[in-house]
Structure formats: structure tokens, C-alpha cells
Amino acid sequence: MEKLFGGIEGGGTKFNCAVGNGPENIIAEARFATTTPAETIGQVCDFFAPYVNQLQGIGLGSFGPFDVDPASPTYGYITTTPKPNWANANILGMLREKINLPFAVDMDVVVAGLGEAKWGASKNDSHSLYLTIGTGIGGGHIVDGKPLRGLTSLEMGHIRIPHNFELDPFQGACPYHGDCFEGLAAGPAVLARFGQRGETLPDDHPYWNMEAGYIAHALVNFILSLAPQRIIIGGGVMQKISCFPLCAERRRNC
């Protein structure tokens, strides 16, 4: 019998779950809205229940801040997130209560970066950066197949970038830093500006040029500090494909 594994992408907007052993062999998958921890994790456990006896283990990539230090008393917890109801939620503990399998956990952006390095766009690169721009902004820097670690998880969404208040008087949407990268360019920032989600704005809306400028400044910071061979950008905001050439154009002027 082939070895099967479970996978969970725990995002601020939705949780994605799958059973398989690689991108070419997914035998089951499901998606749930991120509501409360109890409701969402309950749906996750219900999804995996029919497959528990077939699984070798489950990997979880969670939105953060997320404690990934096995020696920490809050290992597997989402910590000081602004996401309502999720601060200090013991996600790993809730899963282990219902599912008796080995778990491997990390930040969602790190897991995405590892996936790209294993199977995707950066599989031939020794140094790569995966950046997500969606409900939040985060990044995972992968070096020789392993994520770069520090004292805590990397928080690339909270870097400071140039903000011209005359051109853009928006104060920012980050509850901690106001107009950091995440506060200016993540999905909630778009919603706070216009009262609607980014995907509802037309491609020729003037905001996208501003958004591209913020992303371009951040990319230059990451290029100069981390020197990745490749940067892969994902997340809900970047479903607006027309934003990519704008980012490339604006980067040349940073």
C-alpha cells in the first residue's frame, strides 16, 4: 500500500485540507472558511477521520504569528494575531486531541516555500523566497531545502517601506505598526481603503499602481538583504495577475 500523508494549510480566510503523497496524487481535498478555532478545527478533524488509519502523519502550515519552536511552552499555538478569536489558540493541541498521528508544523509561508523548492518553481534553486500577499503578508526563505530560522518566525510583512502621505494619506491597517508593508498592501488594507475586496477592483484601477509600488519596494529590501535566486509571490491579492508586470516596472525605479 502506498504511503499517504495529510496536509493542512491554515489561512486567515480559509483552511485547505488534502490527503495524498504529492501534487500528482491527491486523493481527497476540502476547503473550510476560517471561523472560530473550535468550529474550523472540528471540520478539519472530521475531514481526516475516514483516512486516519491510512496516513503516516499530517503536516500543518498555519497563519501566524505561529510558534514553531518545539522547546517552547506555546509550541503549535497561534500567538498574538489580530485575527478575532484566534489569539493564543492551541491549534496543534486541538488537532492532537482528535487525531492520534504524528504532526509536523510550520508557518504557512514556510510550507509553501518548501513545496515550491521540492516540486515547484524553485526546485532547482539553492536560495529562494516565497512571499504571500493576502489576508496578511509573510515570507519563507528557503536555503538548501531548509527554512531560514531566527529567534522567532520571520515576519516579512512588518518591514517598513516608503510611504508618501501626500500621495497616499491612508494611515495603514496593521493594528501594531499602522503603515508597515502589511498595513499598506495586504487584503485588509485594500478593504479598509475602498470598502471592497481587491479582486473586485478593475485591472485599470489607479490603486494597483500604488500597490505595485509598495510590493516593489519590499522586494528590493528582500533582494538586498537575502539575495534569493528566485522570489515566488502568491496569496489572494496576487490573483490580480495584472499586478505582476506593474511590480516589475515599479521595481526598476526603486
Image: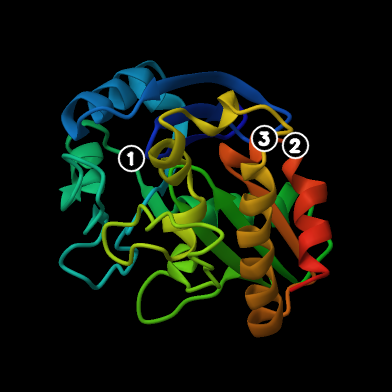
The residue carrying mark 3 is: 205
- Can you tell which mark lies on residue 101? 1
> Which residue lies at the image location 69% right of the left edge and 63% below the top edge?
216
120 or 87, which is in the foreground? Answer: 87
Q: Amino acid at mark 1?
A: Leu
Quarter where residue 49 is shown: top left
Can the viewer see residue 57? no
Q: Quadrant of the N terminus?
A: top right
The residue carrying mark 2 is: 241
235 or 165, which is in the foreground? Answer: 165
Q: Amino acid at mark 2?
A: Ile
Q: Earlier in the sequence, mark 1 or mark 2?
A: 1
Quarter where residue 106 is shown: bottom left
Dot 1: few (<14), some (14–19), or many (≥20) neighbours within 10 Å? some
**Label 3: element kind:** loop
**Label 1: element kind:** loop
Q: Earlier in the sequence, mark 2 or mark 3?
A: 3
Q: Earlier in the sequence, mark 1 or mark 3?
A: 1
Quarter where residue 27 is shown: top right
**Where residue 230 sits in the image (x, y, percent)?**
78, 64
Dot 2: few (<14), some (14–19), or many (≥20) neighbours within 10 Å? few
Q: Is residue 190 left or right of residue 246?
A: left
> Which residue lies at the image location 36% right of the left edge and 81% below the top edge?
151
